[in-house]
Amino acid sequence: MVDHALELLNISCIFRAKDDRAQRYTAVADATLRVRAGEFVSVVGPTGCGKSTLLNVGAGLLEPSSGEVKVFGRPLEGINARAGYMFQSEALMPWRSAMDNVMLGLQYRGMPEAKARALASEWLARVGLAGFGDSYPHQLSGGMRKRAALAQVLALDPDIILMDEPFSALDVQTRQLMENEVLALWASKKKAVLFITHDLDEAIAMSDRVVVLSAGPATRPIGEFEIDLPRPRDVAEVRTHPRFVELHSQIWAVLRDEVLKGYAQQLKKAA
Ligand SMILES: Nc1ncnc2c1ncn2[C@@H]1O[C@H](COP(=O)(O)OP(=O)(O)OP(=O)(O)O)[C@@H](O)[C@H]1O
């Protein structure tokens, strides 16, 4: 039996339209997505297609209109306690130091202060922020804030890591450094990762598998690709690998039409 960490089974999400509450909008329709324990899966798809919606369902933050979520084989009820979630936006509390931000989740789970401080300090060092524990978010660079947010999630030792375009706000160099760091941490801990991104290069460079979503409405997976590139990988170097180029063109052939459809819809919405 395959050991799945997270299963989204026949998920549909229907929202009331924001501008007209009588109207319904089917964001996701009959979508099935599985992540094995220890597997790194990326989901790519056009803007606004429903990537975050699916991730929110996996996190237990959003109840689907229909379908089932299983976590290590068990139906999910409420918040997914075995998952850590890293958002696109800043998750650090500006009035707390980096150390206090990382400690917060640990203490919330009942860890005594001294133990939480020691563990937070260990994780800050692991993400390259030794000596920055007393700094407040505004005193850290964008990349350092992402590192602190990563420490915050990983310190909780989740079995599943959900990441929603975590590095999209970073410059290219910092982003590649962070991607390599995430890969190194992942390789040492081998957690299940569900990673949402707009960026196909990033998805291929990081993942074991890339899932392509169709343009909305009624988004669902329309392609799935095993990424058989050797590991360990350097995200910048792997892009020059002939197999990377081959996979990129195969996946782009599926994604391209959806991106064009998504773009046309955005234009229609804006008109
Ligand atoms: N709570 C909600 N109420 C109404 N509509 C919603 C709600 N949440 C999401 N939607 C709609 O569902 C669709 C999917 O949104 P979602 O944020 O999941 O897309 P996305 O692929 O993550 O977008 P992006 O690529 O821009 O981050 C969008 O059209 C969005 O407007």
Image: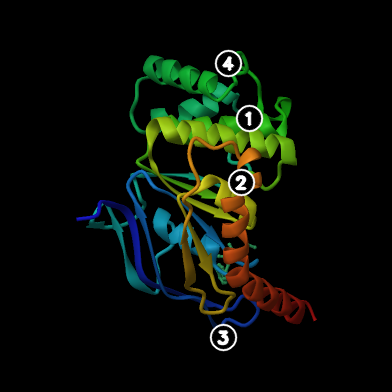
Residue at position x 65%, y 20% from top? 135
Q: Quadrant of ligand 1?
A: bottom right
Task: Assess disc 1: are there few (<14), some (14-19) or many (≥20) residues with their C-alpha within 10 Å of its C-alpha.
Answer: few
Residue receiving disc 1:
95
Q: Nearer the viewer, mark 1 or mark 4?
A: 4
Badges 2 and 3: C-beta atoms under 8 Å apart?
A: no
Between circles 1 and 2, the one closer to the viewer is: 2
Tell me where residue 69 sits by quadrant. Answer: bottom left
Which one is earlier in the sequence, the residue at label 3 or at label 1? 3
Q: Which numbered mark, 3 or 1, is in the foreground of this view?
A: 3
Measure how far apart labels 3 and 1 are at the Cα level. 41 Å
**What residue is shown with label 4?**
130
Front of the two marks 4 and 3: 4
Residue on which disc 2 sits? 241
Q: How is the image coloured?
A: rainbow
Secondary structure of residue under mark 3: loop
Q: Is 193 on the left-hand or right-hand side of 159?
A: right
Where residue 29 sits in the image (x, y, percent)? Answer: 45, 77
Residue 92 in view in this figure: no
Residue 145, image x, y percentages: 64, 32
The quarter of the rendered structure image containing the N terminus is bottom left
Mark 1–mark 4 distance (CA, rounded to whole Å) = 20 Å
